[in-house]
Image (tube, rainbow, N blue to C red):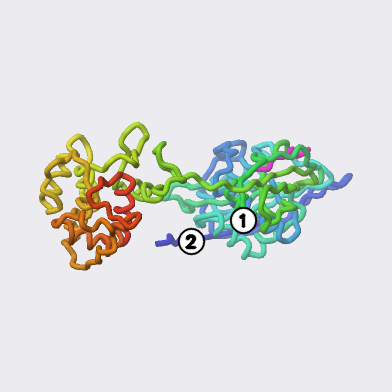
Amino acid sequence: MKRKCLAWILALVMTLTLLPGAALAAAPLQEMDNGETVQWSARSGQIPLIDDASVRGDSWNVLRLTNQHRMSLGLDPLSTFDSLQKVANQRAYEIQFVFSHSRPDGSDFDTALRDYNVSNTGSWYSWGENIAAGYLNAAEVVDGWLNSPGHRSNIENDGFVHMGAGFYTGSPSAVYSYGWSQNFLGSSSCRVSSLQLSQTVIAGGQGADLEELLTQADIVVTATCSQHGTCKLPLIAAMCSGYRENEAGEQIITVRYGGQTAQLTIVPQQPAEPDLPFADVSEKNWFFDEVQYVYENELMSGTGGGAFEPNSNLTRVMAWTILARIDGETVSGSAWEEDARNWAMASGVSDGTNPRSSISRQELAAMLWRYVNQPGNRASLDGFSDVDEVAGWAAEAMSWAVDAGLIQGSNNKLNPRGNATRAEAAAILMRFCENVVK
């Protein structure tokens, strides 16, 4: 059940203009009455500083979603840098104590910029803040901000260049245990250089959606801001040009940010090699899917040393073990042979003799037939040239196995007395599980 939380959001933006001989001017702080304050000692560094520059998954997704929205309107994407990210994480942390643009000691939120030495110079600079509490993930909180005019105006402000995205999960007993913060910064002095990508080659394919490819690859775009140093942001499709979704083959696309460019190569996706631990089983083998099925469903394992030995004969005790596992029994450990034999005898599948002997195709059919209580449906075996080789005691079971599609024959022969290889057994057992016992 989806957890329900009270969700609160609040926005503030300030813009300062520096002109010769002019004083600083700031917009008044919004009033709010939804927060609870904690008593702190007077300002001068008494607020605990968490000094956290990390960009966790939820924070990174807030930046990604914010930039996707901005670029859909023709605005430039925003990047974060360590000092600003520390501010955002600090403000998200403080929300558990007071939900306000005032900090727990009563000072304005912009004092966090000074705490972390965020530089603001140039002919103009601006900063803003969106905060929220109670939202459980990045998509929910960004949607909440976009549906509130004040917050939306911060997100869509074309004067902002950078944004720290903060997220903090506090104690469950805190007033607001999920705190979110967007801390925006703009300056006329910001210039971008040295664009780099964390990955320059990713796998794609004809018809692949570029946004999905980039989200999955999670490529970090790193650049140098002339004022704030190294900054970063997630690569999104709107920053790219030259991608042709329906084109096969390798593609080279251009990534743009801050007037700088980089190149990303998308190569055709190679089919993933299924995760089978057997050196003697490959996709080229006719029995690959069957071996993969019995392995993934824990019916058959290898014979040791990374081998499955598909052409080796299945033994009677192996067959008992597989049927016991289908029946929900745990057959493993040092006593697995005895456990399988006891189960086979108790269930009426076998008399438990000759456990290490190879099992014939008709013996395997008989065991399967007994396992499902000897059903009466039959198919004629007259069309097979070696029908006379079917033993009398196995005739009903073989007729049933052919009717059920478990044994199909080869070159018009059933080969009933031939030993069942491990590969053949895997094929029969996959059909048995999918079409009979289900």
Residue 114 locus on image (x, y percent): 68, 39
**Magenta span covers which residues?**
220-226
Query: Of the residues shown, which amino acid type is indicated by label 2?
Result: Leu
Farthest residue toward the right?
20
Residue position for label 2: 6
SS class, disc 2:
loop
Residue at x 54%, y 45% (from the top left corner): 93
SS at mark 1?
loop
Work out whether residue 417 or residue 425 is closer to the camera in this orientation and state it: 417
Instruction: Give the answer, above or below, for where 314 lies relative to 383.
Output: above
Identify the image quadrant of the C terminus.
bottom left
* Image quadrant where one finds the N terminus: bottom left
| Tag of residue 208 | 1
Image-quadrant location for residue 211: bottom right
Q: Residues within 10 Å of mark 1 (few under 14, many from 20)?
A: some
- C-alpha distance separating marks 2 and 1: 38 Å
Nearer to us of marks 2 and 1 is: 1
Categorize mark 2 by other alpha carbons within 10 Å: few (<14), some (14-19), many (20+). few
Query: Residue placed at 79% from the left, 41% from the top?
Result: 121
Indicate left or right for 79 with 43 as reference.
right
Q: Is residue 151 left or right of residue 132?
A: right
- Location of residue 200 by image quarter: top right
The answer to which of marks 2 and 1 sits earlier in the sequence is 2
Q: Main secondary structure of the magenta part?
A: strand
Which of 121/56 is in front?
56
Q: What's under tag 1, amino acid-wise? A: Ala
Residue 224 drawn in magenta: yes
Residue shown at 69%/44% (left/top)?
265
- Residue 94 appears in the rendering: no
